[in-house]
C-alpha cells in the first residue's frame, strides 16, 4: 500500500520535554510538509522540505525542528521552546515542481497533548 | 497578507438536499489554484475538488461543484444530493506559487447532514 504513515497516533508529553513525531511516505515524493491544526483554525505550515538534506521554515516554525536525511522520512521535533504544543499535527507529501501545484497527500495525523 | 475567509463556522443540510459553503480570499497574485479539502471525524484530509484560476469553467466532481468568481475572489462549494458521509469539516485552501509557494487554509466550515 502506498501512502503516508504517522506515528504515534496519540502522544503525551510532560512540560519541558522534547518529543519527536514520525512521518514516513512510500510515494516517492520529493516534497514533505508539517502542519499544525488547532481547534477552530485551519492548518498552519510549520516546515517543509523540497529535497533531501534541505528544508525551509513555514509560518510557525518557532519551537520546532526537522530533519530530512532520507527521502522517505521527515521527522518533526517539538522542543521545550514551543510554548503551546498541544495540537493535532499533520504530515503531507507531494511531487515537487516550483511555481505550480502538485496535490499534497496527507497522513492520518498525531494528536500531541502536553500534561 | 494573503487571507482566506470562510464565514460560516457551521452549516446543516438535510440528506438529499443541496448546500453551498462559501469562501473568499484576498491576493494580488494572478495565477493560483483553489482547493476544497474535507476532514471527516477520522481527521484524514481528503481533497474534494480543485480549480485553476486561469480556467473560467467551474470545476465539477460528481456531486461536488464550485462557483468560482475570480473578480470577486470568491470560491464556493456546492454539494448536491447530500449524503450522511458528507458530514465533515470543509476547508477552502488557495495555493499561490511564486514567492509564496504554499497552501493557505481557511478556518473551516463544519457541515452536519441530518437524516
Image (cartoon, rainbow, N blue to C red):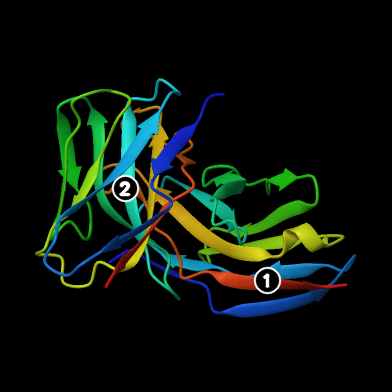
- Give the quarter of the image for residue B85: bottom right
Q: Nearer the viewer, residue B87 or A19?
A: A19
Identity of the residue drawn at 87% across and 68% down: B15
Asked if one can make out residue B8 in the rendered structure from this viewpoint, the answer is no
Residue A86 lies, in percent from the top left, at 30, 68
**Would residue B74 appear left or right of B98 to someone viewing this image?**
right
Residue at the disc numbered 2: A34
Q: Is residue B48 left or right of residue B104?
A: right
Task: Identify the element where label 2 is drawn.
Answer: strand
Q: Residues within 10 Å of mark 2 (few under 14, many from 20)?
A: many
Quarter of the figure with residue A59 = bottom left
Instruction: Identify the image quadrant of the C terminus of chain A.
Output: bottom left
Residue A38 in the image: state x and y as whole percent.
38, 69
Cβ–Cβ below 8 Å for labels 2 and 1? no
Depth order, front residue of A4/A56:
A4
Q: Distance between the Cα atoms at labels 2 and 1?
A: 26 Å
* Chain letter for the residue marked with disc 2 in the picture: A
Tell me if residue B65 comes above or below residue A91 in the rendering. Answer: below
The quarter of the picture where the N terminus of chain A appears is top right
Give the residue pinned by disc 1: B111
Residue A77 percent location from the top left of the image: 19, 49
Residue shown at 87%/60% (left/top)? B81
**Which dot marks residue B74?**
none
| Residue at 46%, 66% in the rendered image | B106
Amino acid at each position: 500500500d502506498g501512502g503516508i504513515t504517522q506515528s504515534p497516533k496519540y502522544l503525551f508529553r510532560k512540560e519541558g520535554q522534547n518529543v519527536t513525531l514520525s512521518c514516513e511516505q512510500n510515494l516517492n515524493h520529493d516534497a514533505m510538509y508539517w502542519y499544525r491544526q488547532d481547534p477552530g483554525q485551519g492548518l498552519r505550515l510549520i516546515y517543509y522540505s523540497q529535497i533531501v538534506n534541505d528544508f525551509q521554515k513555514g509560518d510557525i516554525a518557532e519551537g520546532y525542528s526537522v530533519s530530512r536525511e532520507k527521502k522517505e522520512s521527515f521527522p518533526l521535533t517539538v522542543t521545550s521552546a514551543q510554548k503551546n504544543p498541544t495540537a493535532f499535527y499533520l504530515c503531507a507529501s507531494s511531487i515537487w515542481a516550483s511555481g505550480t501545484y502538485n496535490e499534497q497527500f496527507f497522513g492520518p495525523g498525531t494528536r500531541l497533548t502536553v500534561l | 497578507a494573503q487571507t482566506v475567509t470562510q464565514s460560516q463556522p457551521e452549516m446543516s443540510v438535510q440528506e438529499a438536499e443541496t448546500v453551498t459553503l462559501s469562501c473568499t480570499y484576498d491576493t494580488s497574485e494572478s495565477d493560483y489554484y483553489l482547493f476544497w479539502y474535507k476532514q471527516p471525524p477520522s481527521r484524514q484530509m481528503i481533497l474534494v475538488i480543485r480549480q485553476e484560476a486561469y480556467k473560467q469553467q467551474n470545476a465539477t466532481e460528481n456531486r461536488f461543484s464550485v462557483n468560482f468568481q475570480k473578480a470577486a475572489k470568491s470560491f464556493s462549494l456546492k454539494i448536491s444530493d447530500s449524503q450522511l458521509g458528507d458530514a465533515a469539516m470543509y476547508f477552502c485552501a488557495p495555493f499561490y506559487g511564486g514567492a509564496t509557494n504554499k497552501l493557505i487554509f481557511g478556518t473551516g466550515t463544519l457541515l452536519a447532514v441530518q437524516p
